[in-house]
Amino acid sequence: MNRILHILAKTMSVVFYPLFVPTYGIALFCYAYATQVQPMNVVWIAVTIGGTFVLTCLLPITAIGILIKKGEVKDLYINDPRERTVPYLYAAMGFVFWSYLLLKILHAPLALSCVAVGATAAIGIVTLINRRWKISAHLAGLGGLIGGIFSYCLSIGAIPTWGTLFLWLALSLALMVARLYLDAHTPAQVCAGWLLGLACTFLPYCLLYYVG
């Protein structure tokens, strides 16, 4: 039983590895926007998803791989908080270029651009916090994805269904349990990570929507 639980916890950690989440989010956005709002150009979708994968996943993971070979980082999970600053800075740089791509080059919808900027801010904040406290990047990523879903719903005037809310909250709880089971974080660290990610990707568009 312990072996099965360990495999499940590891699987959750791999599936929701923080650098995979932006690509999931962009793919979900493109699908939802094209089916619920208006058709989207196939080339734009391909460039957006591909650019997101390269800048927020492939390049940071490549940098982490180089650091692993140099012996500066033990593995992709970077469980030692003392090893996290440099890899996180590389990831933050990728996120900055990603935000620029969406804002200035692809002229993405405002809600999506706000989510990208918020996600970039989140990884910067996580980097700073991790110098003192090991906040969960996994939960920050998933919380950020959920915040992005809320921003999208607000932008089209929709209310998330109970089924949608239950699904993402259940996934969040499952990931929290997985990270705790692997002894990667404390309950406070996973909750703080989730709330940080959610706030960073939802509040920017929310403020623009109600104040602007």
Image (tube, rainbow, N blue to C red):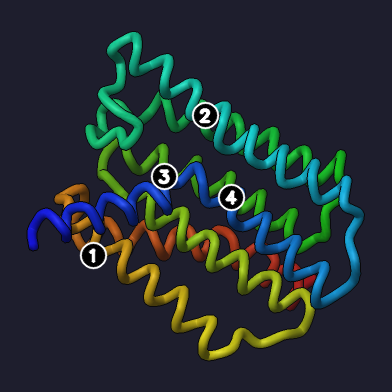
> Which quadrant of the structure image shows residue 169?
bottom left
Residue at (61% x, 84% y) in the render = 160
Residue that lies at the very extreme toward the left in this rendered image: 2
From this view, report whether residue 61 is shown above or below residue 35: above
Q: Which residue is mark 2?
A: 60
- Residue kind at label 2, given as amino acid type: Pro
* Front label number (3 vs 1): 1
Q: Which residue is mark 1?
A: 177
Q: Earlier in the sequence, mark 4 or mark 1?
A: 4
Q: Earlier in the sequence, mark 3 or mark 4?
A: 4
- How far apart are the alpha carbons under marks 3 and 1? 20 Å
Q: Position of residue 165 (x, y in %)?
A: 50, 82
Q: Are marks 3 and 1 in contact (CB under 8 Å)?
A: no
- Residue kind at label 4, given as amino acid type: Pro
* Front label number (2 vs 3): 2
Q: Which residue is mark 3?
A: 126
Left or right side of 45 for 204: left
What is the crowding at mark 2: few (fewer than 14 residues within 10 Å), some, or many (at least 20)? many
Left or right side of 90 for 191: left
Question: Helix, strand or loop at disc 4?
Answer: helix
Q: Are marks 2 and 3 in contact (CB under 8 Å)?
A: no
Q: Position of residue 69 (x, y in %)?
A: 35, 12
Q: Position of residue 210 (x, y in %)?
A: 74, 78
- How far apart are the alpha carbons under marks 1 and 2? 26 Å
Q: Nearer the viewer, residue 210 or 136?
A: 136
Position of the N terminus by quadrant: bottom left
Q: Earlier in the sequence, mark 3 or mark 1?
A: 3
